[in-house]
Amino acid sequence: MIAHGSAFPVAKLALNNSVPPVLMASLRMGLVLLILIPFWKFKIPAKKYQKSLILFSLSMGVMVYVFMNLSLYYSTIISPIILGSQLAIPFGIIASALMLNENISKNKWILIFTSFVGILIIFFDPQLANNYIGLFFASLMAFFFGLAQVYSRQLKELDVSMINASTGLFGFIILMIISSFIEGNLLININSIEKQSWLLISYQAIIVSLCAHLLMFYLYKFYTVGKIFPFYSLFPIFGILLSYLTFGEIPSVLFVLGGIIVIGSVILLNKIK
């Protein structure tokens, strides 16, 4: 969870070094793909998994990371972006109800509503006056992350390296194309990236996208999802702490109040049936 939380301040540091946000997301996915190619061995999954794998790869590899970078790019403070990512859990539950016809209890609907109320309270923080675009992109990031979790349920029998390699492939190619159209000349932009920024992008790819996820999948071998998933509520705490240490961000009273409501609602969402 420390690794997951560190992804946001690390990405913001790279963006502050004038790395284009879409290009940075593409390079991150490209590094993930490059590392996993020896383990992937270009195996094609069975036909019954292909649709879900493509949709998961588009949601996670393209949408989540590009909207994460755009949210950070258009924000002067990043703690609300980190907290907004927690909306992925209520979004995922809603998507499960609509797409998989899963039953959502009355208590869960109440907690979903409460989590959005917590975000609404944060919106009234005067510090966020110039950050509403960033929060909008953070909401889209959370939505697609929740959507990706729904698709991932249909991929449980696939090898993890194949899923991550597919995510890297789609993310790298599609985001590279988008970057060339939106952000300009690719070669010039890539050549202008400084060594420090390359290290930051490599950290995101290796430590966050690979190591952190592999550690979580390792834990799933010994513990149930219900025991592990609530720990995701810790990563915004670590992320906000690292944002304070890196950028000196001090949370306001409204942010703390809204944050407690959001994190508390998410923890309870993972505990009740």
Image (cartoon, grey):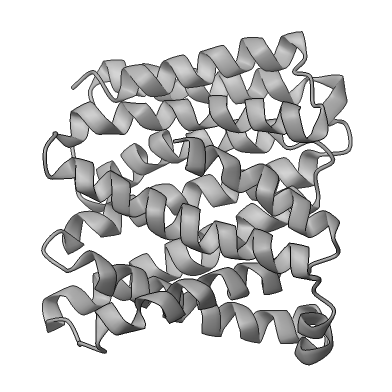
Q: Nearer the viewer, residue 87 or 73?
A: 73
33 or 104: nearer the eye? 33
Rendered residue at 84%/40% (across/down): 76
Nearer to me, 158 or 214: 214
Asked if residue 29 lies left or right of residue 271, the reply is: right
Tell me, yes or no, if residue 55 can be seen here: yes
Quadrant where the image shows the N terminus: top left
Q: Depth check: give the residue in front, 270 or 198.
A: 198
- Can residue 147 be seen in the rendering of this structure? no
Q: In the picture provided, is 81 more to the left or to the right than 145?
A: right
* Residue 104 drawn at (x, y percent): 24, 30
Q: Is residue 41 above or below residue 166?
A: below
Q: Position of residue 126 (x, y in %)?
A: 87, 21
Residue at 19% from the left image edge and 36% from the top image edge: 225
Task: State the residue at coordinates (56%, 51%).
Answer: 141
Q: Is residue 1 above or below residue 190?
A: above
Count of marks overlaid on the render: 0
Q: Quadrant of the C terminus?
A: top left
Q: Position of residue 81 (x, y in %)?
A: 66, 38
Where's residue 4, x and y in %? 49, 43
* Residue shown at 44% from the left, 61% from the top: 60
Q: Would you identify the image quadrant in which residue 132 lies?
A: top right
